[in-house]
Image: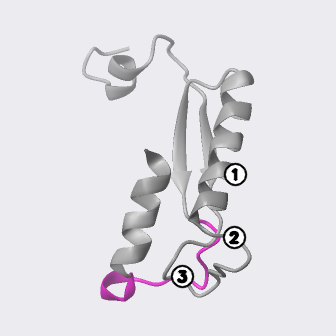
Amino acid sequence: MSDNNCLNKLFDNDKPIIGMIHLHPLPGSPLYRPEKENMKKIISLAVEEAKLLENMGVDGLQIENIWDYPYLKGENIGYETVSSMTAATL
């Protein structure tokens, strides 16, 4: 593989496996229910998923807000959604 390939720069193997973290509904999304799952619970579940994937040998992680449907677009996405997704990745 070419040295210009960004995957070669990030990972030690030629075919890295990337695991997906599925965040539960985030603040600002239509399905967010803080009385059911606040940010502490959402982050706790994401960390649990990450640890499971790490123990299974994945090489990297990707995070998505799959449960934020119906999906908001563009200017309709609130700052609270963006900041909570950022907080979940730290």
Extreme left residue here?
Answer: 4
- Of 68 and 6, nearer the camera is 68
Residue that numbered label 1 is attached to: 45
- Residue drawn at 63 percent across, 78 percent down: 34
Q: Residues within 10 Å of mark 1 (few under 14, many from 20)?
A: some
Residue 29 marker: 3
Q: CA distance from mark 2 to mark 3?
A: 13 Å
- Of 39 and 54, nearer the camera is 39
- Residue flagged by tag 1: what amino acid is it? Leu
Determine whether the residue tagged by mark 1 lies in a helix, strand or loop. Answer: helix
Q: Residues within 10 Å of mark 3 (few under 14, many from 20)?
A: many
Residue that numbered label 2 is attached to: 37
Horizontal relation, residue 14 to residue 54: left or right: left
In percent of width and height, residue 81 lies at 44, 73
Contact, mark 2 vs mark 1 (Cβ under 8 Å):
yes
Check if residue 90 falls in the magenta segment: no
- Residue drawn at 45 percent across, 65 percent down: 84
What's the image's color scheme?
one colour
Note whether 49 is above or below 28 in the view shown.
above
Magenta segment boundaries in residue numbering: 66-77
